Amino acid sequence: MYTITHIENNNLSFIELTSPDNVSKVSICLTQGGRLSTFLFNNIKLLADYKPSSYKNNYASSILFPFANRIKDGKYSFNNKNYQLECNEVDKNNALHGLVFNKTFSSIKKEITPNHASITIQYKNKGLNEGFPYKFNLQLTYTLNKNGLDLVAKIINEDQKSFPFTLGWHPYFLSSDLAKSTINFKSKLKYTFDEQQIINGKKPLDFSLPYNLKNAKLDDGYPLESNKVEFITPEYSFKIKTSSKYTFLQVYTPEDTNVIAIEPMTGAADNFNNKIGLQILEPKNKYKVEWNLIIDPTKK
């Protein structure tokens, strides 16, 4: 049987899902926005080894809600009212990566079978943030199985007012050799950015796909034409599939050797302003997106 374990470590609370043979394991940090903090599959480490203390700087595996990526100057208008979000990206004066990355989640449901382990966690927002004064319930369900990992994010609007939103996920993946790794997705365009890394246009894709990541320096966004992104490394490959009608991707290569952020999103950066992929959730309504991380540990 799969197992689920609750762990307290250095004032942080984790939930671990482990396979029966103990070769696959995920760890979810409840006190850091419900993020995936470790992921081992068939004894292969998939996530970059960032310490919890560095999370405030890299947002590793954070859930991005109610906006993904950046909001220019933290300002937007909705229903003829102006709002100001905290600009936590100080050097560029932007609001960055939503409002739940540093919130504490609680466990509400678990399921253990011979074939998978599943945990559902939630965060309830009381609508006290001046920049986003809406009550919502964000529920995340992580499921570890023989194929990889499924992540379902469900938003429930518990307010009397509708609100704008985008959902995203910000995992950093590890390769044994990024120079021998490739990324593949279906797109003909990439977004262009200003000095604040805010979208100011788009242009034809300037590389061919699949794209070899040798010497790659990326921090770019793409509108996708399919719901699938593929990453191939010397040790493993995976596909991320999404259930979203709106599919966007941000790819970022940090200074860290052999690390890449592959970020699926339901909307583009700054879409509270540019409206690219922006969705509206009506009072008492729900929205759900599923990301399926399907892993092949033997593909070379």
Image: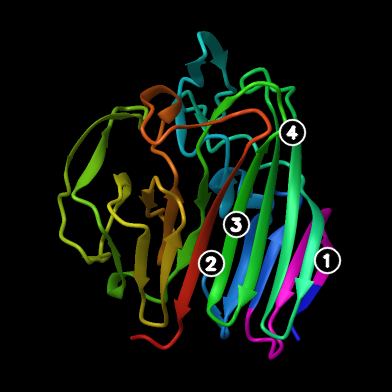
Other residues around mark 4 within 10 Å, as few (<14) / some (14–19) / many (≥20): some
Q: CA distance from mark 3 to mark 4?
A: 18 Å
Q: Secondary structure at mark 1?
A: strand
Q: Indicate whether 273 appears above or below 174.
A: above
Q: Viewer-nearest of labels 2 and 4?
A: 4
Q: Label 1 sits on what residue type? A: Ile
First in sequence: mark 1 vs mark 2: 1
First in sequence: mark 2 vs mark 3: 2
Name the image quarter holding residue 212: bottom left
First in sequence: mark 3 vs mark 1: 1
Q: Which residue is mark 3?
A: 152
| Residue 299 shows up from this direction | yes
Q: Viewer-nearest of labels 3 and 1?
A: 3
First in sequence: mark 3 vs mark 4: 4
Q: Indicate whether 252 appears above or below 177.
A: above
Quarter holding the C terminus is bottom left
**Which label belongs to residue 7?**
1
Cβ–Cβ under 8 Å for marks 1 and 2: no
First in sequence: mark 2 vs mark 4: 2
Q: Which residue is mark 2?
A: 47
Give left or right: position of 117 versus 98: right
Q: Which residue is mark 4?
A: 125
Give left or right: position of 229 versus 130: left
- Magenta span: 5-24
Q: Viewer-nearest of labels 3 and 4?
A: 3
Give left or right: position of 196 versus 4: left
Other residues around mark 1 within 10 Å, as few (<14) / some (14–19) / many (≥20): few
**Which label belongs to residue 203?**
none
Q: Which of these two is toward me, 110 or 60?
A: 110
Cβ–Cβ under 8 Å for marks 3 and 1: no
Q: Label 2 sits on what residue type? A: Leu
